[in-house]
Amino acid sequence: MKSSMRYLLPLALFLGVVVFLFKGLSLNPREVPSPLVGKAAPDFDIPQLHNSEARFSNKEMLGQVWLLNVWASWCVACRHEHPVLVELEKQNIVPIYGLNYKDSQQDGIRWLRQFGNPYVLSGQDPEGDVGFDYGVYGVPETYLIDKEGIIRHKFIGPVVPDDIEQIIKPMVQELSL
């Protein structure tokens, strides 16, 4: 009896670990809960990417529904997302503002010239301070922000066409009323 108990405890621990692994594998990594959803977007006042003398502040966005897309020229996933944002901009559904994250001004401008610029404007966040305040895990990330400056949704990873149809369009329509 004693020797069988010696094997039951490790077996029970092993089975517990297996259950947790299978549970973790079933989770969607794009659905990491954000403590900022439903709360006021953190304030920022940063230089614009194309004109360092001009400023970009989220307070200027009050009164409109908008997207804040965090991107970088060095980001491979941003390259996959970018055509989707360019197409979204053409649909004129919601203004898209960029946050050029931990990138050089020259590289960011060059990247937008090469791939197109879906942004009303982009702000510079070379040290990642604004991204830190927004809880950026990695780029790209996109925030849907309402007229009162409240974050209503956070997209982790590239925005895809289904996100536009199933989440962005309906939410923008609802929040614009």
Image (cartoon, helix red, strand yellow):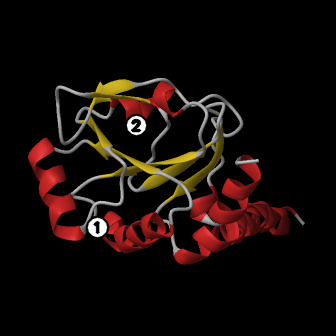
Residue name at image x 73 percent, y 60 percent: 13
Can residue 137 be spotted in the picture?
A: yes
Q: Left or right? Give the position of 103 relative to 140.
A: left
Residue 155 in the image: x percent, y percent? 56, 56
- As measured in the structure, the alpha-carbon distance from the residue carrying label 2 to the one carrying label 1 is 18 Å
Can residue 27 be spotted in the picture?
A: no
Closest to the observer: 166 or 54? 54
Disc 2 packing (10 Å; few <14; some 14–19; many ≥20): many
Residue name at image x 65 percent, y 40 percent: 146
Closest to the observer: 32 or 119? 119
Q: Return the residue at label 2.
A: 131
Q: Secondary structure at mark 1?
A: helix
Which disc number belongs to residue 76? Answer: 1
- The part of the image, by quadrant, that contains residue 136 is top left
Disc with the residue nearer the chain's start (2 vs 1): 1
Residue name at image x 81 percent, y 66 percent: 8
Amino acid type of the residue tagged 1 in the rendering: Val
Amino acid type of the residue tagged 2 in the rendering: Gly
Q: Left or right? Give the position of 98 relative to 47.
A: right
- The part of the image, by quadrant, that contains residue 169 is bottom right
